[in-house]
Amino acid sequence: MQTDSVALTIVVPNERYPETAAHIKSAEEHGKSNICTIDRKSAEENRKESLKGVPIKKGFDRDEFPMAMCAEGGKGADIMYVTPEDNRGAGSWISNQLEKYSDGTKVKIVVK
């Protein structure tokens, strides 16, 4: 994917959300793209598809990457068990970074 089509880059802070950051890095190492095309209207369906067949584990959330709110999310997303505090904190942080951008906006997600 060409980076000139990316509207912005957001940095997920490793020290603040270490489990989610580790998952993003791992998913990228396994071939998942760090480009997210915002697609909020498909998030619920993407989440259903990505989590299908992944059992609930007490005390953990099932974190998806690419995220459900990305057109690239859904079936085939990388799933990792992450503590709820880390997962939900990171999800809220990312949502706040992207709230003013419309569906179709391409975002590069990096971990530092």
Image (tube, helix red, strand yellow):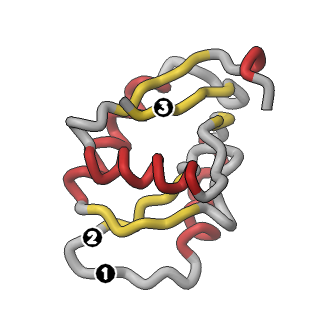
Q: Secondary structure at mark 2?
A: loop
In which quadrant will I find the C terminus? top left
| C-alpha distance separating marks 1 and 2 | 6 Å
Q: How many marks?
A: 3
Residue closest to the eye, 95 or 86: 86
Residue type (three-letter) at the residue carrying disc 3: Val
Q: Is residue 56 left or right of residue 102?
A: left
| Residue 44 on image: x %, y % | 57, 58
Question: How far apart are the two marked residues, 3 and 1, measured between alpha carbons?
Answer: 27 Å
Q: Which residue is mark 1?
A: 57
N-term-proximal mark, 3 vs 1: 1
Classify mark 2: residues with Cα within 10 Å, few (<14), some (14-19) or many (20+). Answer: some
What residue sits right under mark 3 in the picture?
110
Q: Which residue is mark 2?
A: 60
Residue that appears at 29% across and 53% down: 19
Q: Return the x and y of residue 21 as percentages of the image width and height.
A: 36, 45
Q: Position of residue 47 (x, y in %)?
A: 56, 62
